[in-house]
Image (tube, helix red, strand yellow):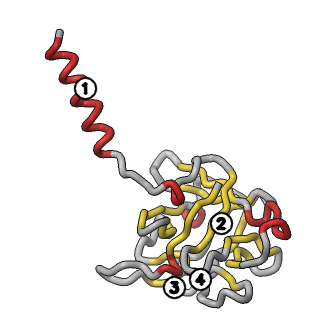
Amino acid sequence: MRARWMLGALGAMATLAMAPAMPASAQAEWGHSTEITNIATDARWAQDWERGVVSTNQPLHELGQRAQWDIERQEDGTVTIRNMASNQCAQTWSEPNAVVFTAECNKWDEAQRWSLTHQWDGFVITPAATPHLAVVASSDEYRSSQLVLGVRPFGGEDTPNAVFRFNS
């Protein structure tokens, strides 16, 4: 009886040890509304009706649900990122300098599937189909700018402009 209990306890500890720990500031409750902010500029993602998805330092109370996103984990481990104001999902074309925009959500659309890679105090957000590209916020913290895809450094660390926090 004692041996079975020990094996069960060891199995539980091994399972817990394999789960990646994430800092509290980077964690998000999957499937709940969150704000997505850049760790370099503190600019937040927001739905812009004319320019797609922008990085902005506009006050949150002015943006309302345009700056609220639902990150929903899919069966294959990727996520979709849905804006709460438009009820549309973030997507892009998988090429360097392509802008991030929103379109009607379709969980089968590869252009709307994203991978999250933990780095520093947040996540690098990459198109699931092209992990060598990442969403990058402009370094201009004084005006809103479109989010675009940048090429990730080969074998190096991503720049802080490509790392985002999820703040519930």
The residue at which mark 1 appears reads as 9
Q: Earlier in the sequence, mark 4 or mark 2?
A: 2
Nearer mark to the viewer, of 3 and 1: 1
Q: Nearer the viewer, mark 2 or mark 1?
A: 1
Q: Residue furthest right?
A: 62
Q: Is residue 47 left or right of residue 91?
A: right
Measured from the top left, where is residue 7 in percent x and y? 19, 23
Q: CA distance from mark 3 to mark 1?
A: 48 Å
Residue furthest left as drawn: 3
Q: Nearer the viewer, residue 30 or 82?
A: 30
Residue at image location 72% in from the left, 78% down from the top = 57
> CB of mark 2 within 8 Å of CB of mark 1?
no
Q: Secondary structure at mark 1?
A: helix
Are the two marked residues, 4 and 3, in contact with CB atoms closer than 8 angstroms? yes
Q: Give the quarter of the figure containing the N terminus.
A: top left
Position above or below: 99 against 13:
below
